[in-house]
Image: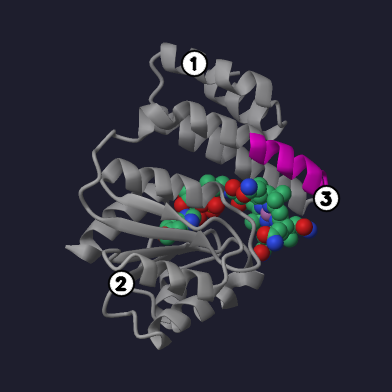
Amino acid sequence: MSKIQEIATAVAGGKMKIVGGLIDEALAEGIAATDILNEGLIAAMSIVGDQFKDGQIYVPEMLVAARAMKKGVEKLKPHLAGGVTATLGKFIIGTVEGDLHDIGKNLVGMMLEGSGFEVVDLGVDVPSAKIIDAIKANPDCRIVGLTALLTTTMPALKDAVSAIAEAGLKNQVKIIVGGAPITQEFADKIGADGYAENAASAASISKKLIA
Ligand code: B1M
């Protein structure tokens, strides 16, 4: 088994204690941090998602795998984020109301920080009113990023985008959306300014949106 497969297996199996050591070994072997992230950690979440869908594992196993994933991301962070000093201004980010998934959101936040944004993270299960309060409290913020991971919380994403527009804040901020069930077509339909499929493209598209 390759080192990256070992990492994916450990994360999918929720073996939090060994993930950090395996990542150190992979980095020492010269494996790129982005490959460890994509082919090791993110791939592990797909494995877990499939196992959950097939009824082989349940929510508690998904949770321990998510914890192992977070441990891995923490370990990789210094090797992924470029250490750029913030210059592009504030970026408000959050997972929409009713949705507790934050791994993808956190990765997006990390990439944004690495690209020069100052990230204001509202966390998960964020009601539209809280997003609006945050925009008002940060008048220098020019972009908001919203995540939804469940088909059942896609309407909350739509509501959040509508609420920002109804609050008259669309002149101040651009909105970028993402998450596994989200598509460019859905983003266009709900009036978002941008959509990104993954964390790296979220950073580059966000830069373009505020250019
Ligand atoms: Co959940 N879950 N989960 N879960 N979970 C999924 C999403 C699911 C697809 C699993 C499955 O059935 N195969 C399924 C959704 C099905 C659907 O909606 N059609 C599901 C379900 C059903 C549920 C529950 C309802 C289960 C239950 O209770 N019966 C429940 C819901 C809780 C809630 O939110 N209210 C639930 C709970 C959980 C845990 C809490 C146990 C845990 C989350 C822990 C956490 O996040 N702290 C969990 C996990 C781990 C998953 C899977 C396995 C992994 C998610 C993940 O982290 N992926 C997931 C299956 C899967 O995704 N294959 C699943 C890795 C992450 C890097 O990818 O978040 O997509 P992702 O982010 C990507 C891109 O989408 C993009 O960039 C990221 C990096 O490249 N991106 C953006 C994300 N945000 C972006 C924002 C942007 C731009 C790009 O701009 C702002």
Q: Is mark 1 within 8 Å of ligand 1?
A: no
Task: Determine whether, in the image, residue 205 is placed left or right of residue 105.
Answer: left
What is the number of the mark on residue 173?
2
- Closer to the chain start, of discs 3 and 1, is 1
Task: Assign the N terminus to one quadrant of the image.
Answer: top right
Q: What's the magenta region?
A: 55-67
Q: CA distance from mark 3 to mark 2?
A: 42 Å
Identify the residue shown where x is 41% and y is 54%: 120
Identify the residue shown where x is 27% and y is 53%: 204
Q: Amino acid at mark 1?
A: Asp
Q: Is mark 2 within 8 Å of ligand 1?
A: no
Task: Determine whether, in the image, residue 211 is placed left or right of residue 1.
Answer: left
Residue 146 appears at what percent x and percent y?
A: 46, 64
Q: Is mark 3 within 8 Å of ligand 1?
A: no
What is the number of the mark on residue 55?
3
Residue 122 in view: yes
For residue 184, which quarter of the picture? bottom left
What is the number of the mark on residue 110?
none
Q: Is residue 208 above or below residue 22?
A: below
For residue 5, which quarter of the picture? top right
Return the residue at label 1: 24
Q: Amino acid at mark 2?
A: Val
Q: CA distance from mark 1 to mark 2?
A: 40 Å
Q: Is residue 176 above or below residue 9?
A: below
- Closer to the chain start, of discs 3 and 2, is 3
For label 1, the crowd category at 10 Å Cα-Cα, with few meaning under 14, some 14 to 19 and many 20 or more, is some
Identify the residue shown where x is 58% and y is 36%: 70
SS category of the residue bearing label 3: loop
SS category of the residue bearing label 2: loop
